[in-house]
């Protein structure tokens, strides 16, 4: 037996058939609204005045500058650090200071 599932978008403003789902955010709250082409254009035009004076914000996630290291690499770093007088824990993240010193000595 075959099934067919259809999703029909209804404009949240006037109840007509919606052409698209529009995402926007204000004051840290994300919103989603289904709109027909005319209402979507109207929303964008209304917001454009404010957008012209606004700055783009970052998405809040920080990019890591150093890639994660494998368990075996972490183990080698810890052994090296202990041999060279660094204080290093047996578990957890290897500090940036130790990582940089280790990589410098390895020529990387």
Image: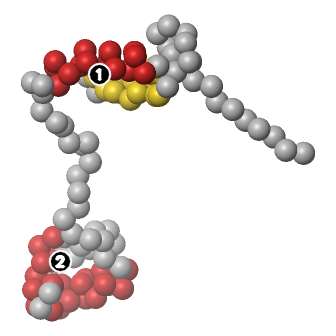
Asked if residue 82 shows in the view, the reply is no
Q: Which residue is disc 2 drawn over?
A: 99
Q: Reply above or below: 49 against 82.
A: above
| Residue placed most toward the observer, 65 or 34 | 34
- Residue at the (16%, 18%) spot, across then down: 49
Label 2 residue SS: helix
- Residue at the (28%, 88%) spot, across then down: 76
Which numbered disc, 2 or 1, marks the residue that appears first in the sequence?
Answer: 1
State the quadrant of the N terminus: top right
Q: Which residue is disc 1 drawn over?
A: 44
Q: Residues within 10 Å of mark 2 (few under 14, many from 20)?
A: some
- Residue at the (21%, 76%) spot, across then down: 88
Q: Position of residue 87 (x, y in %)?
A: 17, 77
Question: Marks 2/1: CA distance?
Answer: 48 Å
- Residue at the (12%, 25%) spot, across then down: 52
Q: Position of residue 100 (x, y in %)?
A: 12, 78
Residue placed furthest toward the front: 38
Q: How many marks?
A: 2
State the quadrant of the C terminus: bottom left
Viewed as shown, does residue 44 lie left or right of 82? right
On residue 13, which mark appears? none
Residue placed furthest toward the top: 14
- State which mark lies toward you, 2 or 1: 1
In which quarter of the view is residue 98 placed? bottom left
Residue placed furthest toward the right: 1
Label 1 residue SS: helix
């Amino acid at each position: 037996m075959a099934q067919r599932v259809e999703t029909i978008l209804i404009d949240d403003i006037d109840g007509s058939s919606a052409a698209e789902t529009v995402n926007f955010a204000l004051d840290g709250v994300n919103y989603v609204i289904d709109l027909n082409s005319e209402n979507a254009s109207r929303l964008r035009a209304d917001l454009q005045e404010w957008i012209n004076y606004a700055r783009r914000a970052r998405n809040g996630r920080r990019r890591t500058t150093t890639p994660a290291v494998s368990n075996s690499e972490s183990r080698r770093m810890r052994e090296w650090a202990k041999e060279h007088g660094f204080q290093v824990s047996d578990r957890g993240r290897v500090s940036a200071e130790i990582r940089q010193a280790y990589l410098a000595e390895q020529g990387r």
